[in-house]
């Protein structure tokens, strides 16, 4: 049974309730990292569930013995403070997670691209074009240099979110590294030379759009992702396989949360027969960025 409410003045009860609220604010997103994603009707509800759990927990403490909320609040703040110095989950992540939930539910839109991929799939399923053959021949995800490069940079970013988003964190970390370091360099004659992923890694991540596509697809496949390369008029870009609508929604929320600057406004994707793919172009600031154009003439399945 709770202690007699008369033991506390009105001011004391107000302060303890305020401290309870301040405990819920960082505790909820911290707990949310360990909950599976909950999506219903396109809404991401796992943060709401985490907030409810945190509220129930703090109310239970207040019911048992109100002053217990003080050490719990100090413990939560202490953990986040220690995490700041260890590079783990911090106050910044708490704020970013709340922004990600708002952006994911109300700010980011889906932009399905209607193009030849959807309208005439048979026209993009042949590999007779010289460019298609040249790119396919250079894809290599079994090279030790490619594998070691990919593993190392898949662990550099977002590791504190691995319990929440799983393998998607590794894919997005690798994307982040490659796209933030890749430098565009023209071929001597357009579309005549295709670099292997090993070459692009050893030359410092320089090359043109097809070199980037070969590198990104090879590296991601070396850590378990599934990719394909799309050829459009004057350009090539890789796409990451998301899976079903539910898988796409999970990936979308991960992108919105992990790439907050600038906030993700739209996620561009291709969908055919319930299977979703998102853009990983070097021109995009985040996975699912805007496509350069929709004049697709070849699709390279890997």
Image (spheres, helix red, strand yellow):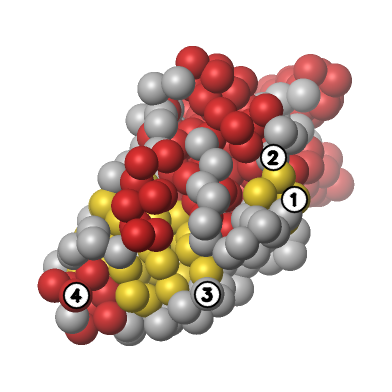
The crowding category of the residue bearing disc 2, from other C-alpha atoms within 10 Å (few below 14, some 14 to 19, many at least 20), is many
Disc 2/disc 4 C-alpha distance (Å): 32 Å
Point 74% across, 64% down: residue: 262
User: Residue 19 location in percent, x, y?
Assistant: 77, 40
Residue, disc 2? 205
Instruction: Please tell me whether mark 1 or mark 3 is closer to you in this view.
Output: 3
Depth check, front residue: 158 or 199: 199
Callout 1 secondary element: strand
Of pointers 4 and 1, the one earlier in the residue sequence: 4
Q: Are marks 4 and 1 in contact (CB under 8 Å)?
A: no
Residue 88 vertical position relative to residue 233 in the rendered view, above or below: above
Q: Please identify the quadrant where the C terminus is shown.
A: top left
The crowding category of the residue bearing disc 4, from other C-alpha atoms within 10 Å (few below 14, some 14 to 19, many at least 20), is few
Depth check, front residue: 109 or 268: 268
Of pointers 1 and 2, the one earlier in the residue sequence: 1
Q: Is residue 73 visible?
A: no
Instruction: Please tell me whether mark 2 or mark 3 is closer to you in this view.
Output: 3
Q: Are marks 1 and 2 in contact (CB under 8 Å)?
A: yes
Classify residue 288 as left or right of residue 248: right
Residue 206 vertical position relative to residue 31 in the rendered view, above or below: below
Q: Are marks 1 and 3 in contact (CB under 8 Å)?
A: no
Residue, disc 3? 234
Point 74% across, 50% down: residue: 183
Disc 3/disc 4 C-alpha distance (Å): 18 Å
Of pointers 3 and 4, the one earlier in the residue sequence: 4
Of pointers 2 and 3, the one earlier in the residue sequence: 2
Of pointers 1 and 3, the one earlier in the residue sequence: 1
Residue, disc 1? 183
Residue, disc 4? 123
């Amino acid at each position: 049974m709770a202690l007699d409410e008369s033991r506390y003045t009105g001011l004391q009860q107000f302060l303890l309730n305020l401290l309870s609220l301040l405990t819920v604010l960082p505790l909820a997103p911290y707990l949310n990292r360990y909950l599976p994603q909950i999506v219903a009707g396109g809404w991401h509800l796992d943060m709401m569930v985490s907030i409810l759990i945190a509220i129930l927990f703090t109310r239970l403490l207040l019911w048992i013995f109100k002053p217990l909320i003080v050490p719990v609040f100090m413990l939560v703040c202490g953990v986040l403070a220690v995490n700041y110095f260890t590079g783990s989950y911090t106050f910044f992540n708490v704020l970013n997670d709340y922004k990600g939930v708002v952006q994911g539910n109300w700010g980011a839109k889906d932009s399905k691209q209607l193009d030849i991929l959807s309208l005439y799939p048979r026209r993009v399923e042949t590999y007779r074009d010289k460019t298609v053959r040249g790119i396919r021949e250079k894809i290599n995800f079994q090279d030790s240099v490619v594998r070691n490069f990919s593993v190392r940079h898949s662990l550099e970013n977002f590791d504190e979110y691995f319990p929440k988003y799983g393998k998607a964190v590794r894919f997005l970390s690798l994307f982040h590294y490659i796209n933030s370091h890749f430098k565009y360099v023209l071929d001597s004659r357009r579309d005549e030379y295709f670099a292997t992923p090993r070459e692009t890694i050893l030359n410092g991540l320089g090359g043109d759009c097809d070199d980037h596509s070969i590198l990104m697809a090879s590296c991601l496949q070396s850590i378990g992702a599934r990719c394909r390369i799309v050829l459009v008029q004057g350009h090539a870009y890789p796409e990451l396989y998301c899976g079903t609508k539910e898988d796409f929604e999970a990936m979308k929320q991960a992108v919105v949360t992990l790439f907050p600057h600038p906030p993700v406004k739209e996620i561009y994707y291709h969908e055919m027969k319930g299977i979703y793919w998102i853009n990983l172009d070097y021109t995009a600031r985040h996975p699912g960025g805007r496509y350069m154009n929709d004049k697709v003439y070849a699709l390279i399945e890997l």
